[in-house]
Amino acid sequence: MTRSSAGRLAALAATAAIPLLVLGVFFVLPVGGMVSRGFVQHGRLDVGGALAVLGRPEIRRAIWFTLWSSLAGTVLSLLLGLPAAHVLHRLDFPGRTWLRALLVVPFVLPTVVVGVAFELLIGESGPLGGLGLDGSPVAIVAGLVFFNASLVIRVVGGAWESLDPRPAEAAAALGASPLRVLRDVTLPALRSAIVSAASVVFLFCATAFGIVLTLGGLRYSSVETQIYLLTNTLLDLQAAAALSILQLAVVVALLVAAARLRRTPDARVGRSRVRLRRASLADLPSLAATGVLLALVVAPLAGLVVGSLRVDGAWSLANYRALQTPGSHQALLVPVTTALMNSLRIAVDATWMSLLLGLTVAALVTRRSRGGGERRLRSVLDGLFMLPLGVSAVTLGFGFLITLGRPPLDLRDSPLLIPVAQALVALPLVVRVLVPVLSGIDDRLRQAAATLGASPSRALLVVDLPVVWKPLLAAAGFAFACSLGEFGATSFLVRDDRPTLPVVIYRLLSHPGDLNYGMALAAAVVLGASTALVMLLVERLRVPSVGTL
């Protein structure tokens, strides 16, 4: 290794020190603390006892249910998301931007809101109550597809909209049918984006918490809900630790696979934006599938809005007016409006934290490497900061509780504890929004600026900032929306007198009374509308041909 290479590696390590310190204190330490509680029993390491937990019948059922429901959710998300990605990113029609924003909204909706919306639709008194889907695995899988099809649209659509159309046009001119063009030309070109989207969708399905809890109850339990029950209700930390380790192993395997895929040629690289075209008869299958997805997204949300406006069989705004009260039967300690203000304040703090950390990480992993050692180090850093993507938010929240609540890190009363947890949950999204943009900036421009006498900060202002400011605002919107809806980690950390809106919705649903239920619906509509507004702004700031994750 030359002195220059050693110096660059040292500078890279020094720049990464602060992000790594943050990750170590607020992610590795809590998760490690949670896991160690399970593996150390009475002062002795008991790995066998923890692993034996995996043999319990209820744990095996949870693992099997997680695997098949996640696989079904992933396949269906692809089947509905891919045609919609084609329609929204290759065809030209009025209202395309609004429709794209609407279909992407579910990805950041709070899981509690989605659970309530589906209950209204398929419950006994709902319009689809006769189908007997309430409390069934079908309802859970439908909820997973509701969430994750939007992710497929965003990831694959970003690649599809800039895909060079000439190979497909040449194949069609040679007599290939539309189906064969799709199979032999288009899908292979999108392979990297599709597999990347599928791996992340599977990850999100496997770690889904609120949907399985609200739609499956105790009858259908996933690994994530089992961790919640074992830690929060049964206090069986050994079993929870074993499941957390299993979940972490799956996450690492998927991240390694995704990293390998990113090293293959990507459809987005070196492509230019193509002109959109009008729909033709050949697009009917894609349009029909998009219609099905639109119905799946709109029906639960419409049912939620209607339910919030119905009181004793009549139209009324009483549920919304009651948001200024703590509900009936002492359901809450503070009014719902106070919880909304708490959520907004926490989301602002979580947003600037995740942006600061995410921008630093994205800049670190996208700078040009000189040599294999530097390239491998950047790849390791990229993978490390993706770990919060798949680790259970429940594990993270409980880890915060047991490791950051005593000296020397007694942060129990710190107002920044929940924002830090939520910032870590949003961090992978922020990084993945910024990395494609930063990696697309030609490093020679920075070198030219330096040659002309610009300082590193000046080069950052004149070269990077004009390109990255819109994606930076979009990443801020993602982080803000994710924070607004975060429930898993927050449910462990929040104080009863300072609740967030998702926590309040869950508590209102857990208390009997028509007023509490109506307030929960109204609060869910307010939360959903807030995140929808943010996502619309994100869509306006979207950089064409650049996907997410």
Image: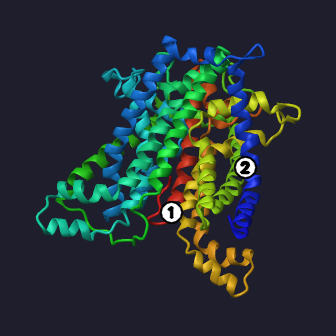
Point 43% across, 23% down: residue: 65
The percent position of residue 278, horizontal first and vertical second, equals 26, 66
Of badges 2 and 1, nearer the viewer stands 2
Dividing the image into 4 quarters, which one contains the N terminus?
bottom right
| Circle 1 residue | 542
Mark 2 Cα shell of 10 Å, populated few (<14), some (14-19), many (≥20): many
Front residue of this view, candidates 287 and 166: 166
Point 55% across, 39% down: residue: 252
> Any mark on residue 195, and which?
none
- Examine the image and state in which quarter residue 282 appears: bottom left
Can you name the residue that lies furthest to the bottom here? Answer: 452
Of the numbered discs 2 and 1, the one sitting upstream in the chain is 2
Front residue of this view, candidates 396 and 532: 396
Q: Are marks 2 and 1 in contact (CB under 8 Å)?
A: no
Give the Cα separation between the discs numbered 2 and 1.
29 Å
- Examine the image and state in which quarter residue 160 appears: bottom left
Q: Label 2, secondary structure: give it.
A: helix
| Circle 2 residue | 20
The percent position of residue 545, horizontal first and vertical second, equals 44, 65
Going by the image, does 521 lie left or right of 161?
right
Going by the image, does 176 lie left or right of 204?
left
Front residue of this view, candidates 310 and 414: 414
What amino acid is labelled 2 in the image?
Leu
**Residue 342 appears in view:** no
The percent position of residue 514, horizontal first and vertical second, equals 56, 22
